[in-house]
Amino acid sequence: MRILMYARSLSPEGGTEISSAQIAKALSQRGNAVDLLYESGGDLLSEYRSFCQSVTRAHLSIEKLSLRDGARITPAVVAGIRRRPDVIYMHTFRDVVCGRLTGRLTHASVVCHLRDVFHDAATRRLARWADRYIAVSAATRDAWVDYGLDGDRIDVVHSGIDPAMYPAGDSIQRLEARQALGIPAHLFVAVYYGRLDVDKGIDVLLDAWGRLGMPVDEGRLVLQGRPVLARDPDAYLRELQGRAPEGCQWFPMRDDVITVLHAADVVVLPSVTEGLSRTVLEGMASGRPVVASRVGGVPEILTGSFERFLFDSGDAVGLAERLASVVGWQQDEPQLGLECTRHICAHFSLSGMAEKVDEILRGEVDRRS
């Protein structure tokens, strides 16, 4: 099967970009030929080149359904036609216009992976332009169905990770990671990493940490990342740092998340919205409990005994209570770390995700043949 894949950005700053690259590689390893069209470059470019048949930069996005936008995406349509794909696979809803035009001219099926809920004036007009949709969670599917998308055309495939990329860290690795970051070994450490934008609820996390009231010689809140969507990212970061309580330590965005995960006692995700968070998957795979807001697909990960780590989005008091409940978990619940790792390996593996996506793509190709 020849797959023409679209990617907006090759910069590994968010879960969409990282997950898109990993699923593309997994599909290639399953014997498929993958061609990539991308709009903006980044550190993932060399990774894509290592397994793709071709890698081409082209304009994919549209602002309006206009002749001007049509002219801008014409080179991408031409490049896609030359690849003679069996199926077109995209990870951003608004790329469905480019995908549909290419699909019409190549008789290829068009499949769109729904990772976020994206509703605006053009959404309803574009909703029928893909043949099939894949939602990262049941919550994401339901949100799109509520907006008018046909639920019979949406398959739910939970995102997955390769657990080997996020190994569980023992006490020795925990000590080494803290030494690397300059964090005292004896502290209780809560970690957030990723975008420091409004939709990630960082203000609520800072409020909760202050409410926890942990002395600076007993606890540390580590935040690794930077604002990406803010109009003035540097100014917004300074604003967050200015309102932060004592005991916060800030690190810049970095590709290495293993060090900060191994330094953590608990990983925190205070998001306002989520599709299906990689942070939760990565944190649990590394053997750490994850305290997260009850939004999007997060409750579909934190099931069973892990449900106790959920709190209502925006509830700083609830978040502080959940953080307090995991202080000293290594002594109180010594099996918790292993249980977290096993849960992710059993239910959210990259190989399992790739198998399901491959099956859906092949089904669409067979349907057209």
Image: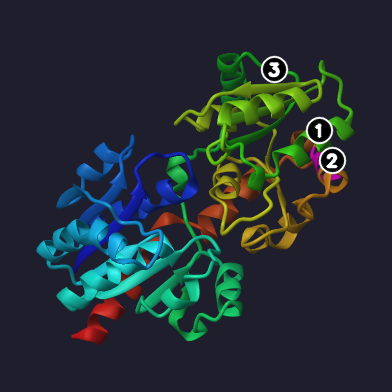
Q: Where does the image place residue 105, in percent across and percent down from the top left?
A: 16, 75
Residue 320: mark: 2
Q: The residue under label 1 is which amino acid type?
A: Trp
Secondary element type, mark 2: helix
Q: Where does the image place residue 64, in percent across and percent down from the top left?
A: 40, 63
Residue denoted by label 3: 185
Q: Nearer the viewer, mark 1 or mark 3?
A: 1
52 or 180, which lies in front?
Answer: 52
Secondary element type, mark 1: helix
Residue at 55 percent across and 38 percent down: it is 168
Q: Is residue 191 left or right of residue 207?
A: left
- Compute the Cα span from label 2 to label 1: 6 Å
Give the vertical position of 141 relative to 301 (above or below).
Answer: below
* Stretch of the chain drawn in magenta: 321-326
Q: The residue under label 3 is which amino acid type?
A: Ala
Residue denoted by label 1: 209
Residue at 27 percent across and 52 percent down: it is 59
Secondary element type, mark 3: loop
Crowd tier of the residue under label 3, counting other residues whose Cα lies within 10 Å: few below 14, some 14–19, many 20 or above: some
17 or 278, which lies in front?
Answer: 17
